[in-house]
Image (cartoon, rainbow, N blue to C red):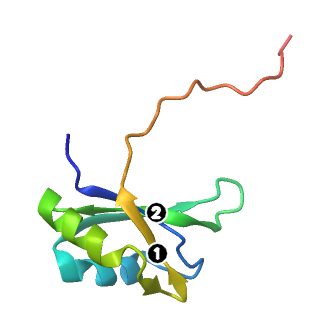
Amino acid sequence: MSQNKLYVGNLSFNSTEDDITDAFSAYGTVTSVTLITDRETGRPRGFGFVEMSSDAEAQAAMQAMDGQELGGRNLKVNVAKPRESRPRGGGGNRW
């Protein structure tokens, strides 16, 4: 399983994809950055995902960036876990 996708938590709500790309590109080629936003308000939720071009680059970025300050907050960086499939739905009987 590929380990080149990283979870990045404790992001400043002012962080942009460019800010994160700039910070992580010191450790290799950043292939994508995804910032997670609230579905209803569109505001940032304070975490996202960074994909590096290789597992080795991802490992180097994770070791270097975990605990580092970006935008006034100390980042939490881990290997991203695969997304769990959750049943869709949400209650409410429709008669």
34 or 78, which is in the foreground? 78
Query: In which quadrant will I find the C terminus?
Result: top right
Residue 41 visible in this rendered orientation of the protein = yes
- At 29% from the left edge and 55% from the top edge, which residue is drawn? 5
Mark 2 or 1: in front is 1
Cβ–Cβ under 8 Å for marks 2 and 1: no
Q: Is residue 54 left or right of residue 4?
A: left
57 or 53, which is in the foreground? 57
Identify residue for label 1.
Answer: 75
Which mark identifies residue 48?
A: 2
Sequence order check, earlier mark of 2 and 1 = 2
39 or 60, which is in the foreground? 60
Instruction: Check disc 1 and report its element: helix, strand or loop.
Output: loop
Q: Position of residue 63 (x, y in %)?
A: 28, 71
Q: Amino acid at mark 2?
A: Gly
Q: Callout 1: 10 Å neighbours few (<14), some, many (20+)?
A: many
- The picture quadrant where one finds residue 69 is bottom left
- At 73% from the left edge and 28% from the top edge, which residue is drawn? 90
- At 46% from the left edge and 75% from the top edge, which residue is drawn? 75
Q: Position of residue 34 (x, y in %)?
A: 41, 62
Outermost residue on the right side: it is 95
Q: Is residue 38 left or right of residue 95?
A: left
Q: Position of residue 53 (x, y in %)?
A: 15, 62
Q: Callout 2: 10 Å neighbours few (<14), some, many (20+)?
A: many
Which mark identifies residue 35?
A: none
Query: In which quadrant will I find the N terminus?
Result: top left
Instruction: Check disc 2 and report its element: helix, strand or loop.
Output: strand
Q: Amino acid at mark 1?
A: Leu
